[in-house]
Amino acid sequence: QQQVKQSPQSLIVQKGGIPIINCAYENTAFDYFPWYQQFPGKGPALLIAIRPDVSEKKEGRFTISFNKSAKQFSLHIMDSQPGDSATYFCAASKSYNTDKLIFGTGTRLQVFP
Amino acid sequence: GAVVSQHPSRVICKSGTSVKIECRSLDFQATTMFWYRQFPKQSLMLMATSNEGSKATYEQGVEKDKFLINHASLTLSTLTVTSAHPEDSSFYICSAPDREDGYTFGSGTRLTVV
């Protein structure tokens, strides 16, 4: 019940493409769903986050789609750029900024020019 | 935004020695600090949660006598890897809850035990 399943494990797209990364969870007590971007040798950086009371959130080129009934959420990266090449992690927490984060397994994205 | 400063960024130590990793919250008070370990090409796995002024809570399977956590002030938490062995080589990352981004992560410490 504590797991967050993430797919795909890796993703290769061309510049301008729209990579989509999917996550699924079991624990209905989760209340906060962030996405993180991590470059090699660096800590994760918050990209965008969503709460269960909304179905979609956009920030710049990043969009989260959230399906509460299916217990799934996904990240879309519009107009992807080579600089977006990184590892992306979804995560979930029972409470915003108080409870521990449970991370997905990660998706390594490569964007080719 | 909130910043968590983590040091050192890289450390190489001999097997059997101890290594201390520090995480400081620079512009906010971190009453809680989460400590993660990340092996190459893997996800972040929570090791323990520390709260200022109290004992840390360790996740199942994490040896509390090997990974000593101290959270003596609202701006400093430390992780000491005692009697380090090559299998302890990993990327260690701290994270503190903050009001702006939910959770702010340190830049990580690459530990190599030789």
Image (spheres, grey):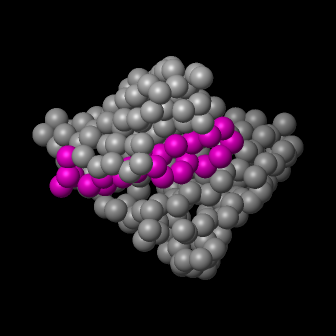
Quadrant for the N terminus of chain B, please: bottom right
A36 magenta-colored? yes
Quadrant hosting residue B99: bottom left
Image: A105 above or below B53: above
Residue B27, horizontal then vertical, whole percent: 59, 77
Q: Is residue A21 left or right of residue B81?
A: left
Q: In the image, what residue occupies the spot 42% across and 42% down?
A: A61
**Residue at 55% over, 69% down:** B2
Q: Residue at x 77, y 57 (%)?
A: B8
User: Does residue B110 show up?
Assistant: yes
What's drawn in magenta, residue-wise? A32-55
> Compared to A73, does A54 lie above or below?
below
Establish if B86 lies above or below A52: above
A69 displayed left or right of B112: left
The residue positioned farthest toward the left in the image shown: A69
Out of A62 and B49, give the one closest to the viewer.
A62
Specify the quadrant of the image occupied by residue A96.
bottom left
Q: Position of residue B75 (x, y in %)?
A: 61, 76
- Out of A102 and A13, give the one closest to the viewer: A13
Q: Is residue B98 magenta?
A: no
Q: Nearer the viewer, residue A56 or A23?
A: A56
- Residue A10 visible here: no
